[in-house]
């Protein structure tokens, strides 16, 4: 039996969180929300907390799912660009 070669990716959490925040911000703007405050209000997020997500601060997986649902996407679609 042949051994599989292991590919190890050294992901840097801060870099990935920055990319995540950029993806969230870009999708919000693509959906026509120039203001994060209005988006947060209309989708039941606290304005300050939502701003943290777009700025690349850590968030819970359940919160990410809520955000992805706001954009009407699957997780696969959300992570298809920029990751």
Image (spheres, rainbow, N blue to C red):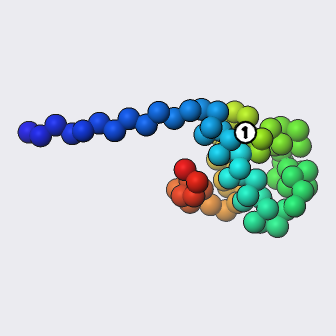
- View extreme (left): residue: 1
Tell me which residue sits at (21%, 39%) in the image: 4
Tell me which residue sits at (64%, 33%) in the image: 14
Which of the two residues, 11 or 78, is positioned nearer the viewer here? 11
The crowd level at tag 1 (other Cα within 10 Å; few <14, some 14-19, many 20+) is many
Q: Quadrant of the N terminus?
A: top left
The image shows residue 54 at horizontal and vertical percentages of 77, 45
Examine the rendering and report whether any part of residue 7 can be seen: yes
The total of numbered circles placed on residues is 1
The image shows residue 2 at horizontal and vertical percentages of 12, 40
The image shows residue 3 at horizontal and vertical percentages of 16, 37
- Kindly state the secondary structure of the residue where label 1 is placed: loop
Report whether 4 appears left or right of 74. left
Tell me which residue sits at (91%, 50%) in the image: 37
Report whether 54 appears left or right of 18. right
> Residue at label 1?
56
């Amino acid at each position: 039996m042949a051994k599989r070669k292991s590919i190890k990716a050294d992901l840097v959490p801060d870099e990935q969180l920055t990319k995540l925040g950029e993806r969230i911000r870009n999708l919000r703007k693509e959906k026509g929300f120039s203001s994060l405050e209005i988006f947060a209000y209309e989708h039941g997020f606290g304005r300050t907390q939502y701003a943290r997500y777009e700025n690349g601060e850590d968030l819970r997986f359940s919160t990410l799912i809520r955000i992805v649902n706001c954009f009407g996407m699957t997780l696969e679609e959300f992570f298809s660009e920029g990751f």
